[in-house]
Amino acid sequence: MSGPCSYDRPRRIRRGAALTLFLAGVLATGAVTGTWSDEAAGAAAPTAPDGKASRAHAPASAFADREAVERAASEAVEDGKSGAQAAADVVSRSGDRWSAIYTPGQFEDFQEQLGGAYVGVGLWVRQADDGRIEVSRVQSDSPAARAGIARGDRLRAVDGHPTLDTPVTEVVSRLRGVAPDGSRASAAAAGTPVSLDLQRGARRWTATVHRTRLSSRNVVTDHPDGVHGPTRVKVGAFAKGTGKAVRRAVRHASPRHGLLLDLRGNTGGLVTEAVTTASAFLDGGLVATYDVRGSQRALYAERGGNTRVPLVVLVDGGTMSAAELLAGALQDRGRAVVVGSPTFGKGSVQMPSRLPDGSVAELTVGHYRTPSGRTVDDAGITPDLVVGHGAEKRARTVLSGLGGGA
């Protein structure tokens, strides 16, 4: 099974089928715990298993050796042990920050999350450099949101199991109620409880929430100043269908009032969806380049995008992976003014492959660059206008100056 993952996670895995380019962004850093948590993902585990196997301060250039991973998995299976665990041990020792190992059940759950529906609590989580798990996103009107959980909260334990230095994939599995063997059939049903040990600053508390069936609404379009003001499009993650939803919004945006594309807190997702989104604003041309073990590849926008509507892109430190690819492309191509704070800096490419026991290894194989050749990994995207507090207000001012005013 070859081919870089197209989202930070492939859509549906089939034996012998190549998986699309996948920049594990949301995954490796934003595991969804209940919401889909990229591409992206949820239900107690959506962003998808972030699967960040490495810990703090691992060099961004570290790559796990595919042959070593596959050999360890094969030997473990022959000895009657877990191939996924053996592979995960190799990845952890490699220092590769973004490679991840998924049991068959974990990977299938992730694919379901990318499709926009899952059973969970509505949390996205990621692993900080100190090994602690923190909430990166909370889905509105979800069990987690109703319990008062907020972005930035620390998730210290799930059902009594500490999360410190625990791979995000494992944390997400516990949130979803998946058994240690990771079998899909063992996933907890809607209505089952899960106990969360949380921390916000000096405050620590425990909340019991009940999993439910959730749908990810990754694109929200509104007009905060009324129909005679700019269109605001908030993209939470690049799941299946995100690109088409953005293109619909762009078609209805007024060239006079402009469009504000909000990518703050977007942990990534399917690269193909990010490219489709770029196509909504570009008339063809380069979106990004990437390499797979030294072999250079390129991603191009489709022709026919709306190049007339004034565009400002909002980003922050939670903008990652495929979202950074999009922001960098629009910035380099001179299509948008980027406003906000520097982005996360996740620009590596992962390629998925099946292991002997049916688990999936997503291993780093290269990095992507913006159209001008800028490296995103560790560096992130620096906005044209760096603004912290009040970034959206400044973005509207910039948009007005571009001709997108009321």
Image (spheres, grey):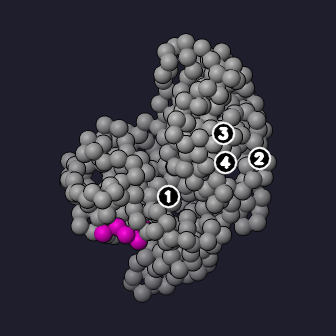
> Is residue 91 at least partly visible in the picture?
yes
Instruction: Measure how far apart labels 4 and 1 are at the Cα level.
Output: 20 Å
Q: Which residue is mark 3?
A: 385
Q: Which residue is mark 1?
A: 29
Q: Residue at x 37, y 45 (%)?
A: 138
117 left or right of 75?
left
Q: Callout 3: few (<14), some (14-19), or many (20+) C-alpha neighbours within 10 Å?
A: some
What x and y, as percent, mark residue 181? 33, 70
Magenta-drawn segment? 162-167
Q: Nearer the viewer, mark 4 or mark 2?
A: 4
Labels 1 and 3 touching (C-beta < 8 A): no
Q: Which residue is mark 2?
A: 371
Q: Looking at numbered disc 2 in the image, what kind of residue is underneath it?
A: Pro
Q: Residue at x 27, y 45 (%)?
A: 148
Q: Which residue is mark 4?
A: 382
Mark sitting earlier along the chain (4/2): 2
172 left or right of 8?
left
Q: Callout 2: few (<14), some (14-19), or many (20+) C-alpha neighbours within 10 Å?
A: many
